[in-house]
């Protein structure tokens, strides 16, 4: 597959080019930002923070947190909102799981988010690579909360099971937008399929995982459609929700049809909470991984996952009983 840009079937005249005052991005002013940037470079890792041009990367990196993007930086899909490049992906790197684990150990993270590009070129969509990365991170950091933000794996149950067998604490898959706009916004993805993936992931571990999803607003969705999306997510057992403003990465991407006010975001948050979501992050600059550590799964979920893993491996999950991966000499 040759490199190509995003699909943009919306009228470009809809674009609102002038950003309102409430859209402000903080610039780095903390040495921790540069330390995180250096660490990511030293370990030859990719972060969605940079690849997706996240507006919060300065803030998050200044706090020593990052969302690691595994399986390369080239995506097999061309979604109209996404800044990640579309091209033929490179082969998977077998030592990447250990490099991610080493980064989480050096950063002393208590919560890590692991995401990936869509890898439709792979039969399992990259699910096994997720599994290996989760396992490596947990071995290096037994007490860490592990959140995965995954593609849909083309709704292959056996591939999804590979990921869930590694027992992440939080399973995140974004529906991104309302049902009507999905064909325009998301390449190859299907609204109902994404909902099904979320529900099946939870069922595969007998409900012992927190499921999470998110929407971008400002693409021309209607209020009643957003509320319907809330209902659809709750009907599929999703309990954590993120809502943020869509910002156009380049003129080739979908137009920003509307800037949602902070007051509207607050209203949507209250509606979502009233519908039974346990945790809602809602605001113009909120993204899937923004302040991800603010949400902690129920203690019984954490304890049950650890208990299940102990039973499966016949070991106690503590630093004394789990091996720490040996870093490669060139990574030290």
Image (tube, rainbow, N blue to C red):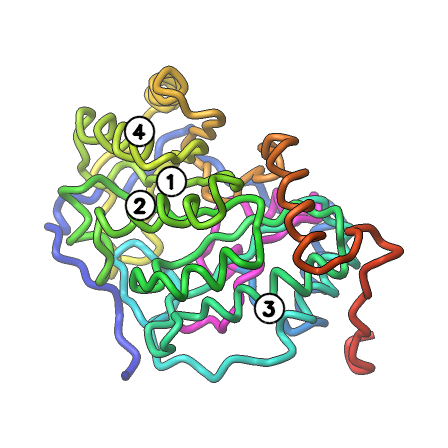
Nearer the observer, disc 1 or disc 3? 3
Q: Is mark 1 on a helix, strand or loop?
A: strand
Residue 305: say if magenta.
no
Residue 50: say if magenta.
yes
Q: Do the residues labelled 1 and 2 touch (CB within 8 Å)?
A: yes
Q: What span is colored magenta in the figure?
A: 48-74
Q: In this view, does 307 lie to the left or right of 162?
A: right
Could you classify mark 1 by the number of other residues whose Cα lies within 10 Å: few (under 14), some (14-19), or many (20 or more)?
many
- Residue 4 found in image quarter: bottom left
Q: In this view, does 220 lie to the left or right of 145?
A: left
Taking depth in this image into account, of 246 and 314 the one nearest to the observer is 314
Point 39% across, 41% down: residue: 213
From the image, tell me which residue sits under label 2.
175
From the image, tell me which residue sits under label 1.
214
Counting from the top left corner in percent of width and height, residue 148 is at 52, 52
For the C terminus, give its image quadrant: bottom right
């Amino acid at each position: 597959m040759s490199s190509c840009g995003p699909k943009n079937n919306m009228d470009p005249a809809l674009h609102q080019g002038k950003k309102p005052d409430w859209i402000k991005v903080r610039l780095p002013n903390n040495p921790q930002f540069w330390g995180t940037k250096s660490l990511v470079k030293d370990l030859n890792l990719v972060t969605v923070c940079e690849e997706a041009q996240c507006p919060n990367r300065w803030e998050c990196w200044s706090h020593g947190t990052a969302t690691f993007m595994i399986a390369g930086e080239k995506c097999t899909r061309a979604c109209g909102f996404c800044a990640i490049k579309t091209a033929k992906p490179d082969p998977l790197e077998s030592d990447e799981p250990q490099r991610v684990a080493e980064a989480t150990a050096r950063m002393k993270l208590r919560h890590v988010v692991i995401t990936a590009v869509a890898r439709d070129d792979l039969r399992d969509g990259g699910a096994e690579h997720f599994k290996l990365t989760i396992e490596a991170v947990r071995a290096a950091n037994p007490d860490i909360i592990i959140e995965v933000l995954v593609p849909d794996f083309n709704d292959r149950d056996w591939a999804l099971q590979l990921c869930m067998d590694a027992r992440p604490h939080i399973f995140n898959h974004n529906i991104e937008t309302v049902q009507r706009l999905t064909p325009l916004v998301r390449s190859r993805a299907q609204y109902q399929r994404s909902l099904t993936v979320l529900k099946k992931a939870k069922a595969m571990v007998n409900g012992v995982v927190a499921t999470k999803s998110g929407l971008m607003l400002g693409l021309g969705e209607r209020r009643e459609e957003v509320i319907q999306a809330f209902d659809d997510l709750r009907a599929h057992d999703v309990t954590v929700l993120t809502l943020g403003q869509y910002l156009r990465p380049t003129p080739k991407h979908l137009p920003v049809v509307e800037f949602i006010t902070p007051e509207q975001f607050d209203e949507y948050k209250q509606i979502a909470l009233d519908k039974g979501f346990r945790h809602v992050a809602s605001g113009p600059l909120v993204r899937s991984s923004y302040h991800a550590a603010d949400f902690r799964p129920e203690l019984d979920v954490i304890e049950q996952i650890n208990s299940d893993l102990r039973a499966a491996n016949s070991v106690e999950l503590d630093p004394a009983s789990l091996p720490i991966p040996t870093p490669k000499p060139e990574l030290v």
